[in-house]
Each structure stands twice: as C-alpha cells, then as structure tokens.
Image (spheres, rainbow, N blue to C red):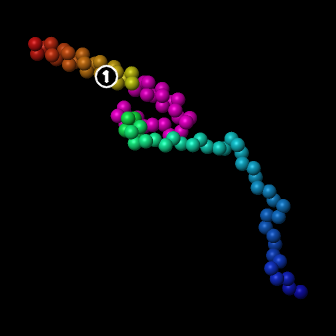
Amino acid sequence: MIQIGGGKKKNKGKKSKPVNVEEQYEDPFVHDILVIHKFSQVGMSPPNLPGDLDDCIEKLKERAAELFKDGEDEQKNALEARKIEI
C-alpha cells in the first residue's frame, strides 16, 4: 500500500523560544546635518546611542575647556605682538 502526501510533519509539538527582554537594543539617534556640522566644528562626532550621551557630554566639557584655554593663549600672544609693534 502506498500513501500519497503523508510525509513527516515538521515542528510538531515544538514551541518557539520566547524573546529575552534583556536583548532589546536601544534605538539610535537620528541627527540633522546641522548637528553633525556643529560637532565637527569642535572636532567630535555626535553620540549614536542614548547610552553614549553621558560620555559625549563629558568629552564636550573637556573639549570646551581646551578650546577656551587655547583661545586665551592666542589672545595673550596677539596682545603681546601689538605691544611690541607700538
């Protein structure tokens, strides 16, 4: 006797594994071209994930202090150069 179409059934009785809640990923930020341009002016790149935001803020504070100090040094040098010319 030949049975037609009666093959072995797949996944009979198997249930799919539940998705682990801890494996969910954070949604990345979507940056406007102006934001990217402003970060590039200070020599940095904007944060891509919300978890990177705190580190980026700290780096921005450090970079701002460096730029402020460099600006003061340039002003002092320009002032001394003007005094020499006079």
- What range is drawn magenta here? 40-63
Residue 47 image point, x, y percent: 48, 37
| Image position of 25 with respect to 58: above or below | below
62 left or right of 73? right
What residue is shown with label 1? Answer: 70
Residue 46 image point, x, y percent: 45, 37
Name which residue type carries label 1: Asp
Residue 71 image point, x, y percent: 30, 22
- Is 59 magenta? The answer is yes
Figure quadrant of the C terminus: top left
Residue found at x 86% / y 85%: 2
Q: Badge 1: how crowded within 10 Å, few (<14), some, or many (20+)?
A: few
Figure quadrant of the N terminus: bottom right
Residue found at x 52% / y 32%: 53
The total number of labels drawn is 1
- Is 15 magenta? The answer is no
Residue found at x 81% / y 70%: 9
Residue sticking out furthest to the right: 1
Residue sticking out furthest to the left: 86
Instruction: Give the quadrant of residue 3.
Output: bottom right
74 left or right of 4? left
| Image position of 23 with respect to 5: above or below | above
Q: Secondary structure at mark 1?
A: helix
Q: Nearer the viewer, residue 8 or 42?
A: 42
The secondary structure that dominates the magenta segment is helix
9 left or right of 44? right
Residue found at x 28% / y 19%: 73
38 left or right of 84? right
